[in-house]
Amino acid sequence: MADLEDLVGEWLSVPEVAEAIGLRQRQVRKMITDGDLLSHRVGPNAAIGVPAAFVRDGEILPSLQGTVTVLRDARLPDEEALEWLFTPDETLPLPGAPIHMLLAGRKAEIRKRASELAF
């Protein structure tokens, strides 16, 4: 498995996510605890990090929550779900990784592929 920290690239701390989306830190932590937001321990202090790509225009990427739900339904642990989202896939209609498709507003294809992971 590729080093997830490097694969994702840019990470935000809980305080940075909270500031970027206008919530309190405890609300962001609850989103992580409730499984609405994927995170990973990163850096030398193993602090909770959220991929920066998940935050766009002052909010969590709108297509993310439903996609995370599908990945959880496929029983992927957070680390594997993050790896899947950020690993380049040359079979996608747009170059790059599934996260790039979500950022381009193409969630249907990604959710379909995510649901296929369960089989």
Image (tube, rainbow, N blue to C red):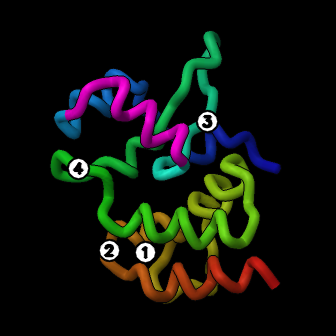
Tag 1 residue: 101
Left/right placement of residue 43 relative to residue 51 reads right
> Mark 1 and 2 residues: CB-CB less than 8 Å, in contact?
yes
Label 4 is placed on what type of residue? Glu
Label 2 is placed on what type of residue? Ala
User: Nearer the N terminus, badge 2 or badge 3?
Assistant: 3
**Judging from the image, what secondary structure is the residue with disc 3 in?**
strand
Label 1 is placed on what type of residue? Met
Label 3 is placed on what type of residue? His
Tag 3 residue: 40
Q: Is residue 29 magenta?
A: yes
Left/right placement of residue 31 relative to residue 117 reads left
As measured in the structure, the alpha-carbon distance from the residue carrying label 4 to the one carrying label 2 is 15 Å
Q: Which residues are magenta?
A: 23-34
Q: Nearer the viewer, residue 64 or 34?
A: 34
Tag 2 residue: 104
Tag 4 residue: 59
**Judging from the image, what secondary structure is the residue with disc 2 in?**
loop
Q: Nearer the viewer, mark 4 or mark 2?
A: 4
Q: Position of residue 50 (x, y in %)?
A: 47, 38
Q: Nearer the viewer, residue 107 or 28?
A: 28
**Judging from the image, what secondary structure is the residue with disc 1 in?**
helix
